[in-house]
Image: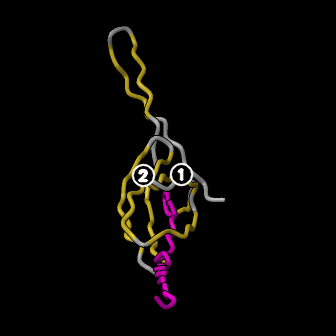
Amino acid sequence: MTGLRLERTLTINVTSAQVGVLEVHAYSDSTEVEASVEVLGVGTFKTPFTKQLNAGSYTLKATYQDQEQTKTATVKEGVTTKVNFTFGVQIPWLLILLGGAAALVVVAYVARKK
């Protein structure tokens, strides 16, 4: 027998992650505010924030004061996806009970823009 020749082929598939950008803001009464936003499966962040993510669909849960909102965002490769949360202005209410009669007192305040 003459010399045997053994060849091996190694194939490596390299796929780069398809990355996009998620940009998130929160507003109350037309003013940008700091809200807590959980991007499910990724983490929790304070607005405003920008985060590079793999392309795909994400659920965002935002909390500002005692208000909550949920939105879905689709991040596409090479694109910035912008998500805005808009929260209402809250007016505190105070209920005072007086000898069996109820009086509703509205405590209103004016939020001044700085």
Which dot marks residue 21? none
Badge 2 local density, few (<14 within 10 Å), some, or many (20+)?
A: some
CA gap between label 1 and label 2 equals 9 Å
Q: Residue furthest bottom?
A: 2
- On the image, the x and y values in percent for residue 82 come to 46, 72
Residue identified by numbered label 1: 44
First in residue order: circle 1 vs circle 2: 1
Secondary element at image label 1: strand
- Lateral position of residue 58 relative to residue 21, left or right: left
Identified by mark 1, the residue type is Thr
Q: Residue at x 52, y 53 (%)?
A: 43
Q: Quadrant of the image for the C terminus?
A: bottom right
How did the renderer colour the structure?
Answer: secondary structure
Query: Do the residues bearing badges 1 and 2 touch, measured as CB atoms within 8 Å?
Result: no
- Lateral position of residue 40 relative to residue 102, left or right: right
Q: Residue furthest front?
A: 1
Establish if 95 lies above or below 108.
above
- On the image, the x and y values in percent for residue 37 come to 50, 53
Establish if 52 lies above or below 70.
below
Q: Residue at x 38, y 52 (%)?
A: 69
- On the image, the x and y values in percent for residue 40 come to 43, 53
Which of these two is toward me, 10 or 43? 10
Q: Which residues are magenta?
A: 1-30
* Foreground label between 1 and 2: 1
Q: Residue at x 49, y 41 (%)?
A: 108
Identified by mark 2, the residue type is Lys
Establish if 25 lies above or below 46.
below
Residue identified by numbered label 2: 61
- Residue 39 among magenta residues: no
- The total number of labels drawn is 2
